[in-house]
Amino acid sequence: MNILIRGAQILNPADGGDGRDGDIAVEDGVIRAVGAAPPGFEAHQIIEAAGLVAAPGFVDLAVSLREPGLEYKGTVFSETRAAAAAGVTTLCCTPCTRPAVDSPATVELIEQRAAAANFCRVLIVGALSRGLAGEELSEMSALQDAGCVALGNDLNPFADLRVLRRAMEYAAGLEMPLFLHACDGALAAGGCAHEGAVATRLGLAGIPASAEIAALGQCLALAEDTGARVHFCRLSCARSVELLADARARGLPVSADVAAHQLFLSEHDISDFNPDCRVMPPLRGEEDRAALREGLRGGVIDAVCSDHQPHDINAKLAPFPSTEPGVSALETLLPLVLGLAADGFGMAGALALITSRPGALLPGNAGQLREGAAADICLFNPAAQWRATPETLHSSGKNTPFLGATLTGRVHRTLYQGRVVHEPE
C-alpha cells in the first residue's frame, strides 16, 4: 500500500536539527521520499499530520514479553501491541522467560508469536547461561544461529567470574555482543532499596551502589582481557558513569543504557512504600540521577530504554520487600523522553536516545527516517496531554509509578514496515 503522510514536522534525529515541515511517501513498506512526494506517486491512503511530529519508530533495548511461561503477566501479542501504541517499532526482548531463552526452540517460539502478532520487530537476547543460573554456559553458537542478536544473563549474577570470563572469550570469538547487568549478587543479596538515608528511615534492607560499581569494574577488566563487546544494561550510579567514561576513553568496545524511570525518580519516591517504585537496580540518589542525565548528554551512556516489565496485580500486593521488582513502562517512554527535551537535550537530541543511538547498537539500521529505509514511523503530538490509567494502557501490566499522572506527549499513529499498526481508537 502507498501511504502519504502530509504536513508533518519531519524529524530524523540522526541528522540533528529540529526538522522541517513536509510530506513522507511510503511505498511497499519502504520510505520512498522525505520532504515531498515524488512525481507520479499515487497514495492509497493519506494521513493528515499537521501539528504532529514524524519521527523514526522508537528502538527499545529492554522489553520483557513474558511469554513463554509467564503469560499471566503478559504475552508476545499483548506487549508488542503495547509497543506499537508506544511508537516502538524495534525492541529487544529479554531472556527471562520460563523456560529461559537458552535454546533454539524457545527462540523459534518467540519469533513465531512475534511474526503472528506483527506489531513490531522483535530482536531476541538469548540467555548467556543455562537457565540463567550463571553456572554453565548456554549453547551460545546455536542461539546465534537461531537468530539471537545478543546474549545476556538478565539480573542473575555469575557465581564464578571464571565462567563469565569464558563466556566473554567465547562471545568474542563469535563476534556476539553481550548485554550485561552490573550487579554483585553477594552485595545486593536481600536488598530491596538503595542503601541510604531513605531505606534506613523506612527500615528496608539496602543495596549499596558498590554492588553495581564493583561488578562493573570486574566486567570492564574482563572485557579488556577478552576483547568482548559488552553493552551494560540499566546503569544507576554516578560512579558507574565515571568508570564507563574512562573505559570508553581507553578504547574499550563498551556501551550502556539507562531506564527512563531512573532519570525522573529517586530513592525519595519509595517513601510511601509504593510497590510500583520497587525496581532493580533500585532508585538511587538525586546526585546519581543528575549524573545519569549528564552521561547521556555527553554520550557516555548511549540510550534510554523502557525496561518494560509487566506484572500481574498480585505481584505488587505484598509488603514492599516481598513485591516483585519492575515497571510496566513502554507507554510512558515517549512522555519521559520528551521531558528530557525540555531539560536542554532538545527534541532531536532527546529522540535520538530512543531512535538512532540505540539503533546503532543493533543490526538493521533501525531508528532512521530517510529515503530507502524501512517505513517504521511514529507520528506523535508533543503537546497532547493524557492520563495514564488502567484503561489507557494497552500492556497487560498496569504496574507503573506514573499511574494516575497526567503526561505530555501522545503517540498518534505508528507505522511498521509501511502498515499502520496503531491509530486513534
Image (tube, rainbow, N blue to C red):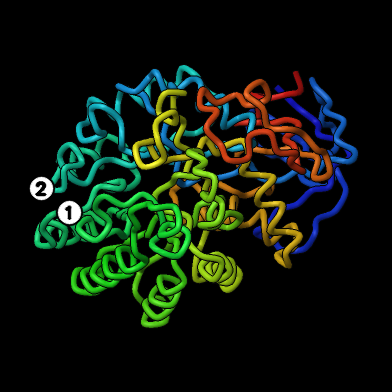
For the point 68% across and 62% down, the residue is: 349
Query: Contact (CB < 8 A) between labels 2 and 1?
Result: yes
Circle 1 Cα neighbour tier, 10 Å, few/some/many (<14 / 14–19 / ≥20): many
In the picture, measured across the screen, residue 43 lies left or right of residue 423, that is: right
Q: CA distance from mark 2 to mark 1?
A: 7 Å
Between residue 79 and residue 90, name the one nearer to us: 79
What amino acid is at disc 2?
A: Glu
Between residue 142 and residue 379, name the one nearer to us: 379
User: Where does residue 160 sit, x and y in percent of width and height?
Assistant: 10, 58
User: Where does residue 358 sit, x and y in percent of width and height?
Assistant: 51, 54
Per the image, the residue denoted by label 1 is 158
In the picture, measured across the screen, residue 241 lies left or right of residue 352, that is: left
Circle 2 Cα neighbour tier, 10 Å, few/some/many (<14 / 14–19 / ≥20): some
SS for tag 2?
A: loop
Per the image, the residue denoted by label 2 is 135
Q: Can residue 38 be seen by looking at this rendering?
A: no
